[in-house]
Amino acid sequence: MRALGSVGGLTLASRVLALVRDSLAARYVGAGFASDAFNGVAFRLPNMFRALFAEGAFSAAFIPMFNRKAAGPGGITEGYHFAERALAVLLPVLVVFTALLIAAAWPITWALSGGFSRQHPTADQFAFAVMLSRITLPYLALISLASLLGGILNSLDKFWVNAAAPILLNVAMIAGLWLFHGNEYETARVQAISVTVGGALQLLWLIWACRRAGVSMKLKRPRFDADVKELLRLIVPAAAGAGASQINLLISTALSGWLLASGSITYIYYADRLNQLPLGLIGIGLGTILLPTISRLLSTGQEQVAMDTQNRGIELALFLTLPATVAFITVAEPIVRGLFQYGRFTVEDAQRCGWALSAFSIGLPSYVLVKVLTPGYYARGDTKTPVRYAMLSILINIIGNFLLIPLLGRVGMGHVGPPLATALSSTVNVAMLYSTLVRRGHFAADVQLRRRLPRLALAAVAMGVALYAGEGLLDPWLGGVMLKRYVALAVLVGVGIALYGVACFVTGAYRLSDLKALMRRKSATS
């Protein structure tokens, strides 16, 4: 809980800043070709690599190996030597890979957008989308290098430093939007430049933090020794396993550009950004903490303690995620309206974005549980099983898109198909991950978890009913100036939290004795 409070608090600050950034983007860019080009292509690819490397594959492969080296005879020094060898190989690979992607920006842009075929872009418009991609692609190398340094700091239990880094990206983008906005195309170009500037700031921050922590690494000649080969062998499957939701979103975006009208990619993007708020606060924070913790426990033979830790991780994840899920289903449109509906973002845009948010939120518990369950595989050196399940979920997502887009398109809701397909495929993925851990004897839900989960679900539903009944009271406030909107949204969130807290005690999910025990424990450790 203390570690999640540190990581989650900073991640929350970053995601709140991201909402401010997206509110400014909606105001100055709106929902048209320029916003689709940036959100669907130029920003989607760096976001995917951030999820795959900074929050996924590299950490999943690197941290357990680093911990094993640090726990060996050579101590932490041996861990640093391993990190140096990994950096020596990673740096030139990233430079070459980024250069190749920049050279191939035209076909990449076409593939990620489906050629914007339903939007019929002119040659100049498509060239603009390609230019945005070329501007943002260096972020891939910057964030991948930052992930190595962040992995070291996480292994040293300095979780907060790595969690604070994304704040710099959002500050750079907010500054760009606020100070240098013009028409929608000029503003989209400013957004792209700000992404790469933000990536450079993140890397510099982690370099400085590593030096403050006594971590000093030298650049060496690349050598593919046994440890580096093992790291690379683990990264590739971990990328597919940890990034299944991102790959699903990438496929959904491409199909949206191919099959849906202008603005659809932007609706899906903003809905995903809101959906990412609890995911970033809870899922990524818990995943960041659980992987080094479980790998350390398993390396010292504490199997039962590792299982207990994962039980509490699942309980905490659903305690925090279920109310967000219900809120995004019941009051999605007021939330979107309060955040984005002004300037170039219209009433219809807000309504359509709200539909997409409700669809995404159906899969929110599974998005978070994937982050909580996969450390149970990675900490044991198994990166292949999550990949097999991720590939199957991606296949389900593709099939779901092709079925749901035309089906929902008959009632004017085709853009809801990709979020709904993504949510369903993620649910299948988490079901497979959970059942396999149980079958192998690596996880068993304890009595406390089995007792609390249905009660937590009931408390979340009760909160949702109350919010839905009272949302009309805030309507006059959600269409005012920015400060008025934010006050209304703060009231909505505050009331929701209070209702959920009361409902948790009424349903018996938590008892007064639990709160007293927690306070006694807190007093004893302070």
Image (cartoon, grey):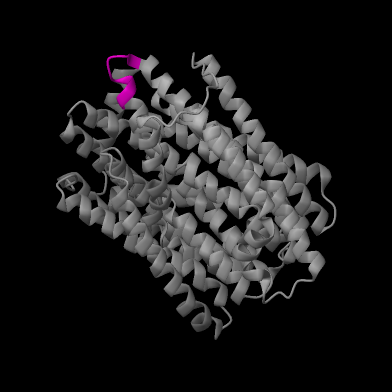
What is the quadrant of residue 263 in the picture? bottom right
Q: What segment carries the magenta color?
A: 68-75
What is the quadrant of residue 322 in the picture? bottom left
Residue 324 visible in rendering? yes
Question: In the figure, 313 relative to 119: above or below?
Answer: above
For image coordinates 49% across by 16% down, the residue present is: 213
Percent across and percent down for residue 352 are 60, 70
The verdict on residue 214 being magenta is no
Question: In the figure, 292 relative to 126: above or below?
Answer: above
For image coordinates 33% across by 23% down, the residue present is: 69
In this orientation, which residue lies closer to the viewer: 469 or 210? 210
Say which quadrant the C terminus sits in. Answer: top left
For image coordinates 57% across by 72% down, the residue present is: 415
Percent across and percent down for residue 524 are 28, 19
What is the quadrant of residue 448 in the picture? top left
Residue 342 visible in rendering? no
Residue projecting furthest to the bottom: 410
In this orientation, which residue lies closer to the viewer: 460 or 257? 257
Q: Is residue 222 left or right of residue 96?
A: left
For image coordinates 40% across by 57% down, the residue present is: 463
The verdict on residue 71 being magenta is yes
Q: Is residue 489 left or right of residue 360?
A: right
Question: In the figure, 12 relative to 385: above or below?
Answer: above
